[in-house]
Image: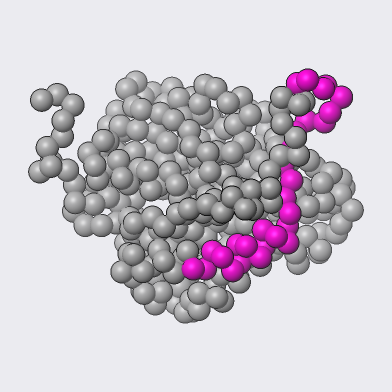
Amino acid sequence: MNGIIHTRLRPTGSRILGVGAYRPMKVVLNSEICQQIESTPEWIEARSGIRSRRFATADESLGAMAASAGGKALASAGIEVADVGCIVVATMSHVTQSPSVATDVAGRLGSRNATAFDLSAACAGFCHALAVASDMVVAGSARYVLVIGTERMSDIIDPHDRGTAFLFGDGAGAIVVGPSETTGIGPVVWGSDPSGRDAIGHDHSYLEWRDNPKLPWPTMRMAGQQVYRWASWQMAPVARAALEVAGVDAAELAAFIPHQANIRIINMLCKVLALPDTVTVARDVAIHGNTSGASIPLAMDEVLASGMVPSGGLALLIGFGAGLAYAAQVVRLP
């Protein structure tokens, strides 16, 4: 019958087939950030590990960046856009709301029939989207899924806010998920902690701004110390659980690619997890800042380009952010 995929035709597993990235042209150093906040480049780097970040220009829209990264991922995977059954975009900075960024990407890439939708889970969005894509492939809902994280965080931060202005950057990263005879994407360990829902979020709503034009544009705020403690200590058990359900020991990992929130959080997670020196740790945050839903695929692209991890090596991914939402899984790198 049409629309039914027989069990024998469903793949045993799924895996990442290709990776792509787009990094905006404009590089913004700490010294430029300090022109609008009371700080120094040295303080910013000591506090976050960040030396620079990229800010998108008017021509580098969410859709344009996402389509560029997605096109590169498809080329890397050797997959034609016509064969993509679904496009999932993780983003928290799409202020237009509708239509979705994913349909913009579909149009830019020339896709005519693919399902396309956005997913909102902030800095954990990419790992959520990856889990959804993997399940779709294994279930037979789509043979190939294009997963993209794309952000223009510069649109939703206050350049004068000392707590967030120096942290965030813009960019897009993408992967192609497809069928595999073996398991290339482990089970996701995910959840949320709504008791910390107010730790990261906008200072007021767009409705309030609409009704009172004297209010400033709504921008994101963050309780830095609360988020640091939560991410540093509460995310380690999540990462361990992802290793356990995948049946992988930390010593078997080729790479650890966490959300690029802050170098201190990354280093603390490595310490608590007791990762051996043989594991390559992504620290892309130093030059690209925190790109929220785009940070993990951007860091994955950087790690693969460095040649420091083997093709087919295992990587532990974990995303965490506003909500407070989190997700982690072990994947086999392309």
Residue depicted at x 41% and y 57%: 189
Q: Residue 219 colored magenta?
A: yes
Q: Quadrant of the N terminus?
A: top left
Q: In this view, which residue lies farthest toward the right?
A: 38
Question: Hey, which residue is sitting farthest front in the picture?
Answer: 195
Q: Is residue 84 left or right of residue 293?
A: left
Tell me residue 172's x, y (percent): 54, 42
Q: Name which residue lies at 45% across and 73% down.
A: 279
Residue 183 at x, y = what percent?
A: 25, 57
Rendering colour mode: one colour
Q: Which residues are magenta?
A: 210-237
- Residue 227's image quarter? bottom right
Q: Is residue 196 above or below residue 77?
A: below
What residue is drawn where x is 14% and y is 24%?
Answer: 2
Any part of residue 175 in sight: no
Left or right: 58 in relation to 125: right
Taking the magenta stretch, the answer to whether it contains residue 208 is no
Let me know if residue 95 appears in the view. Answer: yes
Q: Position of residue 96 (x, y in %)?
A: 61, 24
Residue 180's x, y, as percent?
A: 22, 51
The total of numbered circles placed on residues is 0
Depicted 316 relative to depicted 3: above or below: below
For image coordinates 24% across by 45% down, the residue present is: 138
Quadrant assignment for the C terminus: bottom left
